[in-house]
Image (spheres, coloured by chain):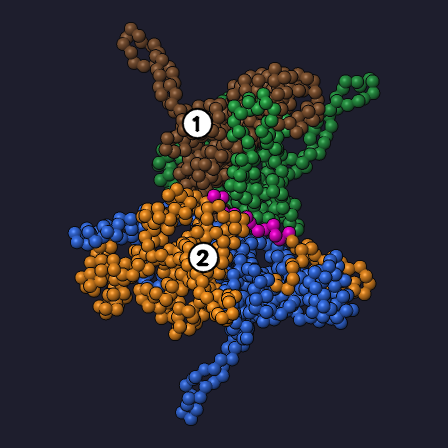
Chain colours: A brown, B green, C blue, D orange
Amino acid sequence: MWGACKVKVHDSLATTSITLRRYLRLGATMAKSKFEYVRDFEADDTCLAHCWVVVRLDGRNFHRFAEKHNFAKPNDSRALQLMTKCAQTVMEELEDIVIAYGQSDEYSFVFKRKTNWFKRRASKFMTHVASQFASSYVFYWRDYFEDQPLLYPPGFDGRVVVYPSNQTLKDYLSWRQADCHINNLYNTVFWALIQQSGLTPVQAQGRLQGTLAADKNEILFSEFNINYNNEPLMYRKGTVLIWQKVDEVITKEIKLPTEMEGKKMAVTRARTKPVPLHCDIIGDAFWKEHPEILDEDS
Amino acid sequence: MWGACKVKVHDSLATTSITLRRYLRLGATMAKSKFEYVRDFEADDTCLAHCWVVVRLDGRNFHRFAEKHNFAKPNDSRALQLMTKCAQTVMEELEDIVIAYGQSDEYSFVFKRKTNWFKRRASKFMTHVASQFASSYVFYWRDYFEDQPLLYPPGFDGRVVVYPSNQTLKDYLSWRQADCHINNLYNTVFWALIQQSGLTPVQAQGRLQGTLAADKNEILFSEFNINYNNEPLMYRKGTVLIWQKVDEVITKEIKLPTEMEGKKMAVTRARTKPVPLHCDIIGDAFWKEHPEILDEDS
Amino acid sequence: MWGACKVKVHDSLATTSITLRRYLRLGATMAKSKFEYVRDFEADDTCLAHCWVVVRLDGRNFHRFAEKHNFAKPNDSRALQLMTKCAQTVMEELEDIVIAYGQSDEYSFVFKRKTNWFKRRASKFMTHVASQFASSYVFYWRDYFEDQPLLYPPGFDGRVVVYPSNQTLKDYLSWRQADCHINNLYNTVFWALIQQSGLTPVQAQGRLQGTLAADKNEILFSEFNINYNNEPLMYRKGTVLIWQKVDEVITKEIKLPTEMEGKKMAVTRARTKPVPLHCDIIGDAFWKEHPEILDEDS
Amino acid sequence: MWGACKVKVHDSLATTSITLRRYLRLGATMAKSKFEYVRDFEADDTCLAHCWVVVRLDGRNFHRFAEKHNFAKPNDSRALQLMTKCAQTVMEELEDIVIAYGQSDEYSFVFKRKTNWFKRRASKFMTHVASQFASSYVFYWRDYFEDQPLLYPPGFDGRVVVYPSNQTLKDYLSWRQADCHINNLYNTVFWALIQQSGLTPVQAQGRLQGTLAADKNEILFSEFNINYNNEPLMYRKGTVLIWQKVDEVITKEIKLPTEMEGKKMAVTRARTKPVPLHCDIIGDAFWKEHPEILDEDS
């Protein structure tokens, strides 16, 4: 509601004669208080105190969305960067997100253990994330897909999961990064077989059935001269977003002596921003390097 | 994920010598199965069977958003129509929504009693609605605000409420429409006092303090010659969206005798679409006229 | 706590010198307020408003319990009557139970749709029912098992299920009565084969495998001359408990003319009590006869 | 159900003529499967994985219960010992309880972090505890109240609270012990004023209003010559139950050489039992001494 402050109490029946008649045509049914009992049907969905709150988003029908918008395969760096831009917007617009991790068409956001944002209500966490991410996706589309118009507004589905300890949270993030690795290795070979060897998708699938990671590495190396370890980190590791101090160069008009009047000055200002990394988060190294994320002793 | 089908099983350790060495550098930590226990932390949030499921969205910080985008006051018909366009998109893209009701910066969506969409999981209902609505808001913005660029991607918050009976559902919708009425009556007078009588917001608020509906009608009529009942229905009643058969005129290229070759024909096709109404839903009349919505005996 | 009223605020540090020293030995750790944050971990478990709340109890390990206490098979009427006595105690001690249904070692209790007992918290409903039932079971044991001492205190497990409509509630109760019927028919034949035909349990089970209700009726009739329909209603239908007016004869000492001094008078008083019935509750007849239970129009 | 195994599938309609007629009188309504959809209304109430699960029981209306059964004030050691006997029974009958703490008419039970008893369903935890405790209370009553018959079966209410870390669990138990301390100090003075100084309850309450712990210690010492620190530990600290190895002396009839035939032998056997302690659990000492309880590094 944007007109004025919401009216908290309901207007009751009028008493004066002329307006009364007019009012009665409106109907006594307008008495809002009579219906307010329906509020009692709202359930409490508070997340357990002192636990990490994770919201994970997944693109809805992104297989089709990728087809329609000509995403490159197996990875479209524009699409991945747009996802990360949206995730950064979510982190900057909402409160208390300490780390985010994204890969493919999914992104996970971790709210700090003791956040009290919207009293820790699960519905607030997930709908704010989902809506902010989705509106940003359309808003920033053109910055990443200059020549590819957006054909329809995409949807995302979200969920909230609560983790009681640092170990379980780290294992959650490891699970998503392991998923990234396994899918990306598979897809890299799958699309090489199609794009370079001319196999059909069904043939490529058949060729890969039952193969282990080492077999896939071997196929890439021997048939396509691809060393998987040299593939871009963003594809292999996904994207981690953490808050880091960044020096921003801003241009500022400032009061100067007369002879320099009207000039602008480039000023450097330190700001804390969600910065993308493409590193391993399964091992201990990352967490030891950034103990402040989980508030762990370093 | 758009590259190929998600890989369901994890790749296990390689055996051949060369790739083994390469693999070991990747680390045995890539074994995804070790982390999959984290799935057990997801809570079940199934909505009670046989109940109406309502998702309500509210604009986040729309007071500020309206200011920044120069919304007309007390009502901006472009903004209201854009909201309705988004709600229509939600109804068409998602499953099993039987009715929606919107006013100001909020919209409620009612899923049918026995829907089994996503196994009735509350998180799925609310994040799909929130994300689809939000992406549509940006996507269709230009259709309604030609001269007003969108400055930033807006957010929405959502919640799920479950109603066990037709009566409680109707009372929920009545509650929202009564809210619309009370706020709109207040805002109509409030902004008339400011825009036409030159009061400050604080003065207008003081003037209205303690007034009843009849008093406000009286002020509008005697001071501004406004008969509130003649104000646009969309402002006074909000917008109801229900599925109705609509004749669509479509232009189709069809096989015709040689002399008419290349000509197109206008064809009329009946389609069911979410149609906006601005009528009373508090009284019985609406529900008697549309018994199919709640599946009630007419 | 039975000594006095619970102390609501915590005692803070003492100030006077002598007692201070004594206090410090107690330790500053006694400050209760420091720990009270742990209350925030309690989840809200309110049952959805306007819905029927059902608590069902089941005996824990009652197969073993029945063995140890020499229960008659397939039905022990003492055990069934004790269950009903406990259920009556539950109905009289707790609030707002409108009907109960029991069979075998289970009992279901239905709280009225709009009960606000303990703010509709599920944990309160089920633990009050479970504990009152269990303590009554031991308390009244001797009234039903004169010659059979109770060897150990039994346990029960409970659950809460919420039903949004009269139809779903009636179907729940029908489900339990159909379960009673099917199990009792099976058990009646099963034990006849063992007790009268001398089969082993494994043989009896084999004999019954794949048989339909009609087959079982036929075995009972042709082999044991039992017409199943003449078996006791309590065994075939279970026990329904509803509130009914009952005339109680009470003996009262009253003021009388001198010549009758010291005499007592028998007085009849109408009281509402949970009365056991062994009737069909699957068909409509029962509900039409007792429309007040579900508050339905008769 | 104790007669035989529960019948899982429903008996369907009969086909042969004679039995058919008999069957039809039973009614086709006996088809159980038609009603089984009601199971879908049961909500999942799994406790969050890897968290401590606490069940706390409170006596229902124990103020009245204590009056009716002439409990000594401010503490009745028989009543406290009976409570502890019930708690021990609960620990021995149920699974995975690692520690319990009781005071006054309440008892808390802590299930181990990774218990999977009944799939961690909250309703199972609390109803098993509540029913086992309540039946034990009646069962063991006579062992503690020889001369005081039990007048009616008592009720208890329970709740489940989930704690994500060792610290929060320890703070929960500290909260209960601090509650014990504060209430017991208050009650000790309160009843001394009544029993020894002849004050009325209202006068005693007035006297204590606004007093701090030190003031109460001072009153006890100067007016009643009571050093609160010398009061029984069970009253001041409550009762902690933990599993400890105990040497049990059992009497056993054993095969012996002829000359000793018929003799019995006392044998000592080590058994793990819930043992009551009345010690401080707020400080670190207790937890350092028993690191196995919380599985903490010692």
**Could you say which quadrant of the image residue B63 lies in?**
top left
- Residue at (42% x, 35% y) in the render: A112
Q: Position of residue A12 (x, y in %)?
A: 44, 49
Residue that numbered label 1 is attached to? A285
Residue C140, image x and y in percent? 51, 71
Describe residue A249's horizontal placement relative to residue A103 as left or right.
left
Q: Which of marks 2 and 1 is in front?
A: 2
| Residue plotted at (59% across, 27% down) | B14
| Tag 2 subunit | D
Residue D13 visible in the current orientation: yes
Question: Is residue A204 found inside the magenta-colored segment of the image?
Answer: no
Local crowd size for mark 2, using a 10 Å CA cut-off: few (<14), some (14–19), many (≥20): few
Residue D81 image-quadrant placement: bottom left
Which residues make up the magenta segment? D37-50
Which residue: 54% across, 55% down? C159
In this picture, residue B234 sits left or right of residue C204: left
Residue found at the far left of this picture: C17
- For badge 2, the amino acid type reads Arg
Using the image as rendered, state which of residue A112 and residue C250 is in the foreground.
Answer: A112
Residue for badge 2: D271
